Amino acid sequence: MILPSVASLLFRLRSGSLFTHQLRRFACGACLLSVTDAAHAGSRADLSLGAVASAPTSTAVQGEAMAHYAAALQLEAEGRIRSALQHYKEAVKHDPANPELAARTAELLINYESRDAAITLLQACIKAAPQDSGAYINLARFFSTYPGDDPFAPDQAGKVLTEALSKFPHSAELYRETVIMHLTRNLREEAASAMALAAKQSVNDPTYWLETGRIAQQVWPLSHPEKKAEHREKVNPFFEKALKLSPISREDVRLAVAQYYLLSNQLERAAEVTEEAARLNKSMEARKLLVRLYQTLDREPDAIKLLEELLKETPTDVENRRLLVNLYEKNDDFERAVPHAEALIQAAGGTAEDYMSLGILLLRSGQSDKAQQLSQRTLALFPSNPRFTFQAALAQRSLKRYDDALKLYEKTEALAQGTAPEILNDSFYQSWGDALQAAERYDEAAKKYQRSIDLTPESDPARAAVVLNNLGYMWLEQNKNLDACGKFIAKANELDPQNPIYMDSLGWWHFVKGDYQAALKVFLDVEKLLAKPGNGDAEIFDHIARTYLKLGDRAKALSYFDQALKLDPGNSQIKQRKEQAAQP
């Protein structure tokens, strides 16, 4: 089998080998040439050990190491492990200061030769690379993974790491290895001591503090809620040190610190750090994170303001535009949401969901004409989608075009039965009933209301209460089916007690029945519910005034008419009733 080219070896290493650094370590023009030559000298490469030169130059040494390493990879891929081991050993001879190469060779040595041979090789690597902490880490890992037979022998792994930390006190990787070793042995105090040593170091590189901070999170994890205070006391200083040492250009450090505070649920501090990053660097990433933090902290006005700024810079950012629409909608600011929903359709290509969202916003902001115009477009774009037919019905109803609206309700029901039966729920039939009532088709409205009541989930009785009240009050206004009215309204009050709207309906039922004392009692109870500052309902005060008139108390009646007119000064009917009551 011909050895693969250097390019294919590089691909193999990049796509899964444990030794992705090896070829880079060996790389130089001469060594790559020598490997290529070795791979293509004749129809079959010579993998024999005898081909190694006895006294090569420095460049040639690297080439020999590379050639043996490439041969070892090939043999290992073929399952010829013992032969591969011999080439690994030869590669180590030529490059003894390579910790990764030594580690791989040691793994094979313990399986195919002996533990002592592996230890000797790893110790030799430390001697050859005294300034490389990786050589110490490899030996410590080896001792942890392959302990000797004597259970009472000294802790060799711990000894190696202690020695390494004395030589490399600024190595975050060494602290990580030490902490992992202690934690796997359930030695948390020893792990904490290692982090205490890391915290004492005089290191000006913020990356060191980020890395040691992440290691400290393993020693004081947030998975134990009762240790939250200890976690913050021990871990926060690492990230604060990283923040303090980071220059203006190191936005990555500030964002990493902010992410730590976010994930550890220290949201206020996360926002402060992110605000600083956004102020210093003005990056999109920092400001997007800040928007999310403002949302989490219920600082929605700040989130909205920042999103508006971001969209001025990048008006085609669909994610930010959609987020802003959602925030405005959540705050019932439908009118300000509309232009952004319109822009979203332009930027995102106009999905069905975006059109639906815009239609809802137009209706909820009272822009009925625009909602109706939009419905003409959506009905053409999505003719078989009953949700848009329903939305068109709502638009026509809001314009009091009841005949057109009712035709669209019927069309919605027909379409939805085959494609989207889930929308034919209690809310749909309540809406249809409301439209029929507005069109003065009361018997048909009653049937839709009853259908809505039948479909209302038992888990949400308040939804049924709305329809029961609507149905009862509708007949009450027509002075029909009064006994049934009382049952419907009483049931609404039972399902949703202390609701002033339903209580007012009950009081008015007593009024229509001529039981004015019972009516007054209910109305005055409603008034107590509305006694909070800013609350009030002109209709309630009008009902109380009319009840006092029936009971012959003109002074109180006039007083309540005045309160009603304060809330609704343009109501001509209340004015007329007051004027009539004031006449002798």
Image: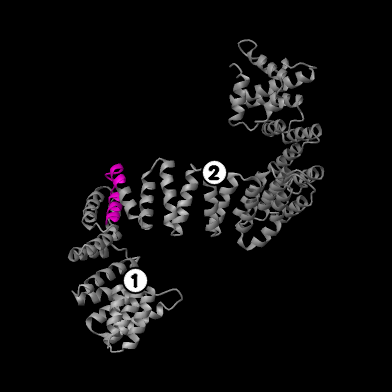
From the top left corner, tell me how far across and down residue 284 is, in percent. Answer: 58, 44
Query: Residue at the location (65% across, 31% down)?
Result: 19
Q: Nearer the viewer, residue 97 or 427?
A: 427
Mark 2, Cα crowd under 10 Å, few <14 / some 14-19 / many 20+, is few
| Element on which disc 1 rests | loop
Measured in 3D between alpha carbons, the distance from the residue under mark 2 to the one under mark 1, in whole angstroms, is 46 Å
Q: Which residue is mark 1?
A: 570
Q: Which residues are magenta?
A: 376-396
| Element on which disc 2 rests | helix
From the top left corner, tell me how far across and down residue 85 is, in percent. Answer: 68, 26
The amino acid sitting under disc 2 is Glu
**Residue 192 located left or right of residue 561:** right
Q: Nearer the viewer, residue 357 or 552?
A: 552
For the C terminus, the image quarter is bottom left
The amino acid sitting under disc 1 is Gly
From the top left corner, tell me how far across and down residue 253 is, in percent. Answer: 67, 46
Query: Residue at the location (24% across, 70% down)?
Result: 474
Q: Is residue 385 magenta?
A: yes
**Residue 435 located left or right of residue 88:** left
Q: Which residue is mark 2?
A: 313
Front: mark 2 or 1: 1
Q: Is residue 482 above or below residue 231?
A: below
Mark 1, Cα crowd under 10 Å, few <14 / some 14-19 / many 20+, is few
